[in-house]
Image (cartoon, helix red, strand yellow):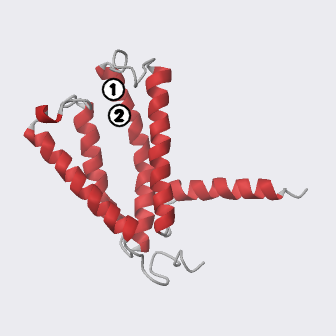
Amino acid sequence: MQASAAQRLTGKTVMGLLSLYFQPSGRIGRSKFWLGWIGLVLIEGVFNYWLVTGLFGRDPFDPVTKELSKPAYQLLLLCNIIFMFPLFVVLAKRFHDRNKGALWTLPYLAVFAAMIVVLMTGNIQPDVRPDAVPSSLAGLAAAYLAVLVWTIVELGFLRGTSGDNRYGRDPLAT
């Protein structure tokens, strides 16, 4: 029995998303990078909202009930580690397009993981006033911002390698 065009398109889309987020080989262009990264941010935001409201029964927009207990907050951050692998895959594929290995993802992922660990250990709460942040944590935040800006410029704005490279075919050539 033949699959309809809509079923083929849906299957192709699902396989494309799975490949984008879970298959680190190959290359992606800037547009897929932006779609992949923004998609992850949106999925993570919906996931976090669901955890806070559905699992912990809090309204993040209500100043009275938005506070989470420390164990709930730590569980929330721990669950967010799930998103590090798809993030690694999207970054690695884009670095491949720039003819660089997946190890180039380490600066961003290391600082991102350090921020999660700092938040999980309770050294700083996410809604603390900026003037109350200890200087060592301000240094970590500055390092994260610097690496984030570098990552965005490197992967989001600079063109990939023209033609095929050691990581695969040029995504713009297809």
**37 and 164: which one is in front?**
37
Residue at the spot of label 2: 77
Res 107 seen here: no
Residue under the point 27% across and 63% down:
150
Residue under the point 46% across and 75% down:
167
Type of residue at label 1? Tyr
Secondary structure beneath label 1 = helix
Name the residue furthest right: 1
- State the quadrant of the N terminus: bottom right
Residue at the spot of label 1: 73
Res 174 seen here: yes
Q: Please state if 27 lies on the left or on the right of 9 as rendered.
A: left
Mark 1 crowdedness (10 Å alpha carbons): few <14, some 14-19, many ≥20: many
Residue 21 position within the rendered picture, expressed as x and y whole percent measured from the top left: 51, 54
Name the residue furthest front: 62
The answer to whether residue 113 is above or below residue 26 is above
